Image: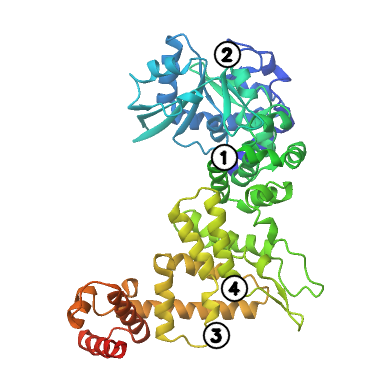
Amino acid sequence: MCECRALLHMIGSEARWPCTGVAAKRGGPWGAGHVPFSVVPNANEDNPSALSQVQRRAVSELLRVAPVADELGRRFQEAGFRLALVGGSVRDALLGRLGNDLDFTTDARPEDVLKIVRPWADSVWDVGIAFGTVGAQKSARSGDAVRNFQIEVTTYRSEAYDRTSRKPEVSYGDSIDEDLVRRDFTVNAMALALPEQEFIDPHGGLEDLAAGVLRTPGTPEESFSDDPLRMLRAARFAAQLDFEVAPEVVAAMKAMSERIEIVSAERIQGELNKLILSAHPRKGLGLLVDTGLADRVLPELPALRLESDEHHRHKDVYDHSLIVLEQAIALEQDGPDLVLRLAALLHDIGKPRTRRFESDGRVSFHHHEVVGAKMTKKRLTALKYSNDMIKDVSRLVELHLRFHGYGDGEWTDSAVRRYVRDAGPLLERLHKLTRSDCTTRNKRKANALSRTYDGLEERIEQLQEQEELDAIRPDLDGNEIMQVLDVGPGPVIGKAYAFLLELRLENGPMGRDDAVVALKEWWAAQA
């Protein structure tokens, strides 16, 4: 992707195809600003080789899906309709990162799209047909491999929000230009007509792609009025693509931030997830905070920008949290982990509510992990996250200080067992979060903390080998407890089980005979 960006950058400002150069004078059936893909390099006569390289890279990406794209384009053409690859698919082809998800746009109405696609695709779904979108899956050979392409075909459309509505009003259009102007950003407002392979870029998207800039096809005010979620998308694409957002777009985001409140929590959550899972989440999150959008969708984040006390005796919690997020990302091993990233971002959100200025000049945040866990649960619930996600992220926030609570001394076996028991299946994530939470510039202190945690992980591995820590349970199960005590099911069995579990955590495996003796002694003391 970096190589493609560099080649695109070589094109520079001469890539204004809709209004300059030979290409702008070419027409074809799609109209002005629509250029046969084979002649696009002529649009930049100052540097034709650079543009040719970009085009060849894009063509290489598009040829990979050609059996699917060309077949589908011909089917629409034979039925009397037009079809174009559009939006992110064209953008990603130019960036050398086109995947198997392909977006098309057409002048055919949804019922006609179904008639064309059903006999051809492996499967078809119409869950988005109310918004003009038909989905399909098609397997096709690409080189030596068979790829499964996920396809969406959407009728030309324009949509806008009522000032008091959470749902867009969809109306169909009759031209691709009308469709492209309603798209969120110019880099997503390029298309490739099929099967003619004509490149369509009426808003200078290639130039902005080369410059790494996010602009809107029309005015940003019009764009964000049509769909306020686009303000979050600006931050998301900045984080995903490492692009800058044009100043006029940022200004509109600041001025219109309150419009995000009409968007549903589910749609907001979707954009936040994509942003947080991106390659550069700090960039997007910073934009949300600076524009005031975070105040409305994730207010706990800007609240971390605590004013420094006069002696600067506590860290900038906002900046610290973003560093922890970046350090957690660096520890990921199996791809982006949303649970870990959310926990890293939110781990200190309890600090503003628990901050105290002590008499000796120190600043304290006692029990901020407990308060933060409750705040995390409340915010993630409001954003409609799943119960499992809420439970896991909140638990990590609650446990993120547990390691420091044991001090710098040697951990007892009992302490290690409790740490593992409390973390449960989140143990590996807790390891990463705890290590990421060290942002001190004092290298000696940082190294000491790292060595201490190394020692803890070694102790855990040793005890896991000896005691199967992943499945800590008492030496007697519920049935055995009832048999020993000669009682039936009831609350007392739970109390007895908790007593034996406490012994197991404190002493390690006891063996059945010792557990029976201890249980009887406990039972006698209950009389």
Quarter occupied by the C terminus: bottom left
Task: Measure how far apart labels 1 and 4 are at the Cα level.
Answer: 33 Å
Give the residue pinned by disc 1.
264
Q: Is residue 400 left or right of residue 49?
A: left
Q: CA distance from mark 1 to mark 3?
A: 47 Å
Q: What residue would you read off at disc 4? A: 367
Sooner in the amino-acid sequence: mark 3 or mark 2 = 2
Q: Taking 470 as reference, is 352 left or right?
A: right
Mark positioned earlier in the residue sequence (1 or 2): 2
Give coordinates of residue 250: x percent, y percent. Answer: 74, 41
Q: Which residue is mark 3?
A: 408
At label 4, the amino acid type is His
Residue 170 occupies quadrant: top right
Q: Amino acid at mark 2?
A: Asp
Q: Distance of mark 1 from mark 2, alpha carbons? A: 29 Å
* Residue 426 image point, x, y percent: 43, 65
Task: Pick whichever, 338 or 360, lies toward us.
Answer: 360
Looking at the rendered structure, the secondary structure element under dot 3 is: loop
Query: What kind of colouring is applied to the model shown?
Result: rainbow
Between 24 and 366, the residue placed more toward the observer is: 366
Amino acid tagged 1: Ser
Q: What residue is shown at x 44% (from left), y 24% (from top)?
A: 69
Residue at point 38%, 20% (across, down):
117
**Badge 1 element:** loop
Q: Nearer the viewer, residue 457 or 506?
A: 506
- Residue 156 in the image: state x and y as whole percent: 55, 19
Q: Quadrant of the N terminus?
A: top right
Above or below, 430 relative to 403: above
Precedes in sequence: disc 1 or disc 4: 1
